[in-house]
Each structure stands twice: as structure tokens, then as C-alpha cells.
Image: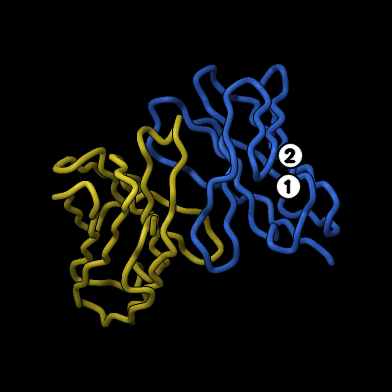
Chain colours: A blue, B yellow
Amino acid sequence: DAKTTQPNSMESNEEEPVHLPCNHSTISGTDYIHWYRQLPSQGPEYVIHGLTSNVNNRMASLAIAEDRKSSTLILHRATLRDAAVYYCILLNNAGNMLTFGGGTRLMVKP
Amino acid sequence: NAGVTQTPKFRILKIGQSMTLQCAQDMNHNYMYWYRQDPGMGLKLIYYSVGAGITDKGEVPNGYNVSRSTTEDFPLRLELAAPSQTSVYFCASSYALAGVYEQYFGPGTRLTVT
């Protein structure tokens, strides 16, 4: 699976939107873009995933660049509970293994 | 639904001891996975299963064994524990291929081998 690059950390104020970027310049046509997050001392939690079109769910939105070489996870109103490490992962439609890189540590200030 | 459950939450083993980490899911998922996470690192896949009776190795299978006799349960066996197996172990499940479907994770088992 192709590699992703994310900033090590980001900071946000509570109740403000947060845009978490991910670069994946070597993405292939069959790679899905997945986002998971891990709160302190907990297991990873699925956030959202997409292939080509932007996606929305109750937790977040995923904006995918037209060339698919980058994507952005959008949390519309950050809460203190959103403080976590966010992982951007590429996985093709035959893949079984989630490969977690370093992720982005999101800090939310009250 | 309880989702994915894991027992025990914590365990301390002496070098050379054996133990079984339990994992169960009640979502009728075909696919189940075992990962380990060393401090400050990402997750690494140990073993996975695509259905009852079928298992396969992941990235770091040495020192572990698995079995899948039912859809619900996927125990991980550690034989002859070593300090290098000190880690947090996460079990996960998904409806089908992880590329297309999300994985649901359990709360983890924190294992220390001394």
C-alpha cells in the first residue's frame, strides 16, 4: 500500500473547525483513503473513508483532491473529546492490513 | 451490541510463560484481526482470519498462534513469552475486506513480560 504523509501535530480551539491534511502522492486507482483516530489509552476508532468523491458522515467530512494525491479530514466543530491521534491510511480493495504511520496528534484547547 | 470485547485488560507474565488473549465480537463479522502496538508506535498486524477455520499471518506473526473455530471468537495464543512481546494488543473485526469496510477495534489488552 502507498505511503501517506501527515503533520506530526496540530492545535485547534474548541468549537472551531479543524482541517487535517494528508498527502498520498503515490496513491493507486484502487486505493481507498481511510481515516482512523486513537484517543489516549483506547483502541483505534474508524472515522471515515472514501475513494474519489467527498464523503460526509456524522463524525466528519473527507475532502479528496481531484487528482487524489491529497485529502483533508474536516471536523466541523472540534470538541475536547476530539483530541486524539488521527491516522490517514491507504488500503486497496483487496487489502486486509491497516498500516498505521505516525499520524497527526490533534490538541484541542478549551 | 457489545461490539468487540477483549479479556483480560491487563496482564503481567514472566518470561517463558504462556497465555491466551481472548477476543469476541457480536456483529457477525467474517473478518477478524490481531494487532500489537508498541509504545509511541503505530499498529502492526499479527494474524487475521477471513472466516471460521481460516487464518493467515500478518506482518509480525512469530511467537503467536491463533485459531478461529467460530465466527464470534478469535483467541491469540502466546507461547514462551519474551520481553519483546510487551505491548498493547488490539483485536478488530470487519464485515469484509478492510479496504472497503471499516474495522471495529476492541479496548486492548496491555501485556507486560518481565
Q: Is residue B110 left or right of residue B13?
A: right
Residue neighbourhood size for the residue with mark 1, other residues' Cα within 10 Å, grouped as few (<14), some (14–19), many (≥20): some
Q: Is residue A56 left or right of residue B66?
A: right
Which of the 4 quarters of the picture holds residue B35?
bottom left
Where residue A8 appears, as percent x and y from the top left, is 71, 52
Where residue B34 appears, as percent x and y from the top left, is 33, 53
Q: How many marks?
A: 2
Question: Vertically, is B56 above or below A109?
Answer: above
Residue drawn where x is 17% and y is 52% of the image: B67
Viewer-proximal residue among B23 and B20 = B23
From the image, which quarter does the C terminus of chain A lie in?
Answer: bottom right
Residue drawn where x is 85% and y is 51% of the image: A16
Where residue A106 appears, as percent x and y from the top left, is 73, 56
Q: Contact (CB < 8 A) between labels 1 and 2?
A: yes
The tag on residue A21 is 2
Mark 1: amino acid: Pro
Q: Chain of mark 2?
A: A
The tag on residue A7 is 1
Where residue A93 appears, as percent x and y from the top left, is 43, 25
Viewer-proximal residue among B38 and A98 = A98
Viewer-proximal residue among A84 and B57 = A84
| Label 2: element kind | strand
Viewer-proximal residue among B100 and B42 = B100
Q: Are marks 1 and 2 on the same chain?
A: yes
The tag on residue A81 is none
Which of the 4 quarters of the picture holds residue B5?
bottom left
Residue neighbourhood size for the residue with mark 2, other residues' Cα within 10 Å, grouped as few (<14), some (14–19), many (≥20): some
**Chain-order first, disc 1 or disc 2:** 1
Mark 2: amino acid: Pro
Residue drawn where x is 60% and y is 61% of the image: A39
